[in-house]
Amino acid sequence: MPSLSQAVPLREVPARRRPIEPGMRLWDDVGLITFSLTAGSAFLLQTMHPAIGTVVAEHSVYKTDAIGRADRSIASVMTWIYGGQEGLAEGDRLRAMHAKLRSTDEQGVTYHALASNAWAWVPLTAPYSYVVGAKYFSREPYSDEEAEAFYQETVQLMRNLHVAEKEIPATYDEYLEKFDEVMNDTLVAHQTAYDYLATLRRIPPPPQLHPALRPLWRVGMHYPGKVQHFVTVGTTPDAARRKLGLKWSTTDEVALRALGWAVARAVPMLPERVRYFPIAFQARKANREQARLQRMLEHRPM
């Protein structure tokens, strides 16, 4: 009887984890500066998960250092997508960092940050947030085929982040079913979700900011905070808004669509250096330079 290695050569077994590559939809979409608009609803949905909400409430600094926390989160996500092998290492780092995080809620229920359903829910909010984000902030919403393609790339991302295979739906349609199931049966009106929304409305000054400058910070961040709060509520599913008791009117919807129309036309006109976050821009630039070098090597005099 042949050995396992003889029966199934290692080279024929696809790697479960592999870097996100240029040409993928994730490569083109995630690094855009509109990430800051589309990610709000994803994080709100995450905080509504009892395990995530409880762990975040105890261990996160988002209420005291919202800007620093956001910068670190964005840098981490950009590394997942644009970091190559470093993106896989970032998944390992996050897994190790969360391994010891346990928190107990007011009812005495203890939650572990690495519980498989909670760990999976974080990247599982991404397809929703990008599909709904494209609906508002892109000239063209995702077609069914594009949503499926984006989801399949997110499946690879989930594997890179060590999400258990049992938590990963096979298709986008199955994902939608799982998303609704978690929404209806698991998510709650967690206090952390309300705290997060309050933080969006009044973004706290960075701890290192001199006290004399904090009044200026509050004035300067008043409208950006209101806009981020407005977009987050508007792009959150109706079912989640109902659970949280958030109101959303027809007038609000018209205003969000008008804002989205403007963003969808303004962002593509920006230089790439401004249109993308720094890690994403540098990765895209390096990829083009590598491609140019490769062409030169292929056509060099021999």
Image (cartoon, grey):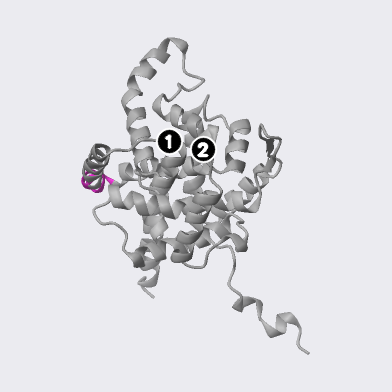
Regarding mark 2 in the picture, which secondary structure is present there?
Answer: loop
Check residue 72 for magenta coloring: no
Of residue 242 and residue 1, the one placed in the foreground of this image is 242
Q: Any magenta on residue 270?
A: yes
Query: Is 45 positioned to the left or the right of 230 in the image?
Result: right
Residue at x 69% of width, y 85% of height: 7
- Dot 1 corresponds to which residue? 245
Region rendered in magenta: 265-271
Is residue 289 at all visible to an observer of this figure? no
* Residue at 27%, 51% in the rendered image: 138
Tell me the quarter of the image containing the N terminus: bottom right
| Residue 190 falls in image quadrant | top right
Residue at the bottom extreme, as displayed: 1
The kind of residue tagged 1 is Gly
Residue occupied by mark 2 = 189
Relative placement, left or right, of 263 versus 93 is left
Q: How far apart, in angstroms, are the residues tagged by discs 1 and 2?
A: 8 Å
The mark nearer the N terminus, 1 or 2, is 2
